[in-house]
Image (cartoon, rainbow, N blue to C red):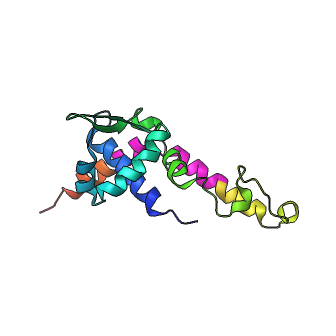
Amino acid sequence: MKISTKGQYGLVALADMAIYGERDYINLKSISERQGISDKYLEQLFIHLKRSGIIESLRGAQGGYRLSRDADKISVKDVLNTLEGPLALVDCIVETKEERCNQFDCCVTRVLWQKIMEELNSITDAISLADLAKLFNEEQKGSNEYFI
């Protein structure tokens, strides 16, 4: 499984929102400039994120987008599932898949793929946007220190 630019950039944009104004409305242009992501591409991603309830928008001069709930209540899994779909290495273990592989019941590797998916989901569910913001702020604080 490889996370596409949709998942990567969406997560970066939402982490940016958690860092620079968790509950404030932020315009896409400012996220675009800070993160080096096209504002047109961000618009496309934010349609999905708004539809899923992760963000909300306000029109007008003071408008923009903001997280719909506190950053510690939005997990990396929430974001990636919205933009990428289920986090699975192979399609046959996705529960929402309509057709099962004809080898599903006797597949010797299915248990492995299922275990990896469960671990991946567990890890991404345990990390929130607030955690990413905290890690970023700690990294920035550490990079400003110097010794003589």
Q: Main secondary structure of the magenta part?
A: helix
Q: Is residue 131 left or right of residue 63?
A: right
On whether residue 127 falls in the magenta region, the answer is yes
**Residue found at x 61% / y 53%:** 86
User: Is 28 in front, or is 111?
Assistant: 28
Q: Is residue 6 left or right of residue 17?
A: right
125 part of magenta stretch: yes
Residue at x 77% of width, y 60% of height:
111
Q: How many marks?
A: 0
Question: Which quadrant: the C terminus?
Answer: bottom left
Query: Height in image: 77 above or below 63?
Result: below
Residue 125 x, y percent position in the rendering:
55, 45
Q: Residue at x 34, y 46 (%)?
A: 133
Name the residue furthest right: 106
Question: Between 64 and 18, which is closer to the camera in this rendering?
Answer: 64
Splitting the image into 4 quarters, where does residue 22 fall? top left
- Residue 131: horizontal and vertical position, in percent? 41, 44
Res 142 visible:
no
Q: Residue at x 64, y 58 (%)?
A: 88
Residue 24, x across and y down, in percent: 28, 34
Residue 6 in percent (x, y) is at 45, 58
Residue 124 visible, this angle: yes
Answer with left or right where residue 1 lies relative to residue 49. Answer: right
Asked whether 119 or 144 is in front, the reply is: 119
Part of the protein shown in magenta: 118-133
